[in-house]
Image (cartoon, rainbow, N blue to C red):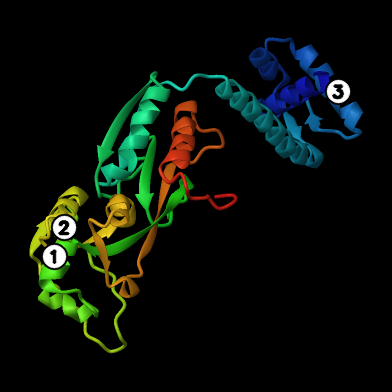
Amino acid sequence: MDSLNGFVVFVQVAETRSFVAAGRLLGVSASAVGKSVARLEEKLGVRLFHRSTRSVTLTAEGTLFLERSRRILAEIEAAELELSQAAAVPRGRLRVSLPLVSSLVLPALGEFMRAYPEIELDLDFTDRMVDVIEEGFDAVVRTGEPADSRLSARRLGNFRLLLVASPDYLARRGTPRTPADLRRHDCLHYRFPSSGKLESWALRQAPGEPDLQLPTSMICNNIETRVCFALQGLGIAYLPDFAIRDLLADGRLEPVLADHVGRTSVFHVLWPASKHPSPKVRALVDFLRARVFPAAKAKPGV
């Protein structure tokens, strides 16, 4: 501990450029500060300060040692914080921004509330790209690859977008064989609330074919409506696989143009970058990773 105390005294003198000021901040005499620095210099075998009656300045060796000392003390402080947080019970308000895919996250968030009753969830569902730091969010769930260097990220899992319709609809209207066949079908579309634009259907077409102008039999701004209308045989919908997995498994919906639909995406949970996130953020990240895509195996180091 004497060695550690020597680091602390040295850094304080280096930052204040005064034995008296350093002693005042540390609650010891200037004489005690001087003796501590002298012992450290003797141990290291170098002179750390140039001393005069008017000033205290760092030597070249002292400047180098200051950088290392600050790093050592920062690591010790971080370790203490990490250990204290590890023992803390996650609690407090947790503000989270989520995409408009409630069917994916609500079951997991319900379990989270039961597991952490001292955390107050403040959930904001939007398709808008929020500024996590400027708007004061503790965490966000987003699709796509992270692009903000101010944020830490963990992968939750991948999903595919599929074209689907009910067996009844396909029996009445026929099954499309090529993307161009969709021009003769009822198409159920999604509009992004924040931009007003329709979601494009990523379809593989033969080279040179013009972009498809798809019919718009219905437009809405959520997943649930499109799933409901597709089940009622009202048209073909473009939906994420996690929202219709059970409906595909029991045959209530069938994939359409499976060889022509190739879009995949990924969900991440992100939060303001920090070596040691708060217990409530760490609890949320771990919980979502374990339960949103339980069958998915996260990549090492992601």
Residue 65 percent across, percent down from the top left: 77, 37
Q: Is 52 situated left or right of 271 in this image?
A: right
Q: Which mark lies nearer to you, 3 or 2?
A: 2
Mark 1 and mark 3: Cα distance apart in space: 88 Å
Judging by the rendered image, the residue that carries numbered circle 3 is: 38
Disc 2 + disc 1, Cβ < 8 Å: yes
Asked which secondary structure carries label 2, the reply is: helix
Image location (x, y in percent) of residue 14: 70, 29
Instruction: Kindly identify which numbered label has been placed on residue 282.
Output: none
- Callout 1: helix, strand or loop? helix
- In terms of sequence position, does the residue under pointer 1 or pointer 3 come before the other? 3
Q: Which mark is residue 230?
A: 2
The one nearer the camera, 38 or 138, is 138
Which is more N-terminal, label 2 or label 3?
3
Tell me the residue at 79%/13% (across/down). 32
Q: Nearer the viewer, mark 1 or mark 3?
A: 1
Q: Is disc 3 surrounded by few (<14), some (14 to 19) or many (20+) residues within 10 Å?
A: some
Residue wearing tag 1:
169
Q: Residue furthest bottom?
A: 208
Badge 1 crowding class, 10 Å Cα cut-off, few under 14, some 14 to 19, many 20 or more, is: many
Instruction: Please tell me which residue is depicted at 10% across the width and 69% down the height of the picture.
Output: 172
Left or right: 283 in relation to 4? left
Residue 259: percent from left, percent from top: 34, 74
Name the amino acid type tagged 3. Ala
Residue 261 visible in the current orientation: yes
Label 2 Cα neighbours within 10 Å, binned few <14 / some 14-19 / many ≥20 = many
Q: Marks 3 and 2, how far apart in space?
A: 81 Å
The reply to whether the C-beta atoms of the residues labelled 1 and 3 are less than 8 Å apart is no
Instruction: Determine the image quadrant of residue 260.
Output: bottom left
User: Which of the two marks, 2 or 1, is nearer to us in this view?
Assistant: 1
Tell me the distance, in whole angstroms, between the alpha carbons under discs 2 and 1.
8 Å
Residue at the image position 38 percent from the left and 29 percent from the top? 111
